[in-house]
């Protein structure tokens, strides 16, 4: 969800600046990857789902399947002091 501006607004800029792409092979079973295919009302988000399905059908190796995910999961790491300063800003 770090790709969505509204979600990004919840984090201090220092966290977002240090965001790194997670190893998607370790994340396949996590909602962080699969949630990108679901709309807020629970229906499938076709603009991402259709290309994903086509890419999976063409895949010939595991790496192709991992690459089929349109949005990659990112990991953000930062100091608690940064969060507190950001939350308490005037």
Image: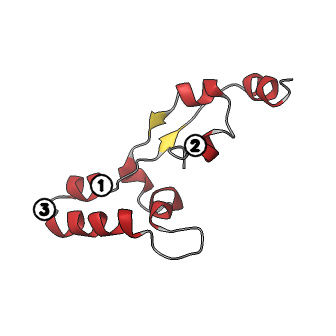
Q: Residues within 10 Å of mark 3 (few under 14, many from 20)?
A: few
Residue 78 location in percent, x, y?
64, 27
Q: Nearer the viewer, residue 32 or 53?
A: 53
How far separated are the C-alphas under marks 3 and 1?
11 Å
How far separated are the C-alphas under marks 2 and 3?
34 Å
Tag 1 residue = 66
Residue visible at 57% across and 43% down? 5
Residue 49 occupies quadrant: bottom left
Please state if 27 lies on the left or on the right of 63 as rendered. right
Q: Residues within 10 Å of mark 1 (few under 14, many from 20)?
A: some
Q: Nearer the viewer, residue 40 or 11?
A: 40
Q: So how many labels did they put on this image?
A: 3
Residue 56 location in percent, x, y?
23, 66
- Examine the rendered structure and indicate whether residue 36 appears above or below residue 74: below
Identify the secondary structure beneath mark 2.
helix
Residue 75 location in percent, x, y?
52, 39
- Examine the rendered structure and indicate whether residue 90 appears above or below residue 35: above
Circle 3/circle 1 CB separation < 8 Å:
no
Tag 3 residue = 60
Tag 2 residue = 5
How far separated are the C-alphas under marks 1 and 2?
24 Å
């Amino acid at each position: 969800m770090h790709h969505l501006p509204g979600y990004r607004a919840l984090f201090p800029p220092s966290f977002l600046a240090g965001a790194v792409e997670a190893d998607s092979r370790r994340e396949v079973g996590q909602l962080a990857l699969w949630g990108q295919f679901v709309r807020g009302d629970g229906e499938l988000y076709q603009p991402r789902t259709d290309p994903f399905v086509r890419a999976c059908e063409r895949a010939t190796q595991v790496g192709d399947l991992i690459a089929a995910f349109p949005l990659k999961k990112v990991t953000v790491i930062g100091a608690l002091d940064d969060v507190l300063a950001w939350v308490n800003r005037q």
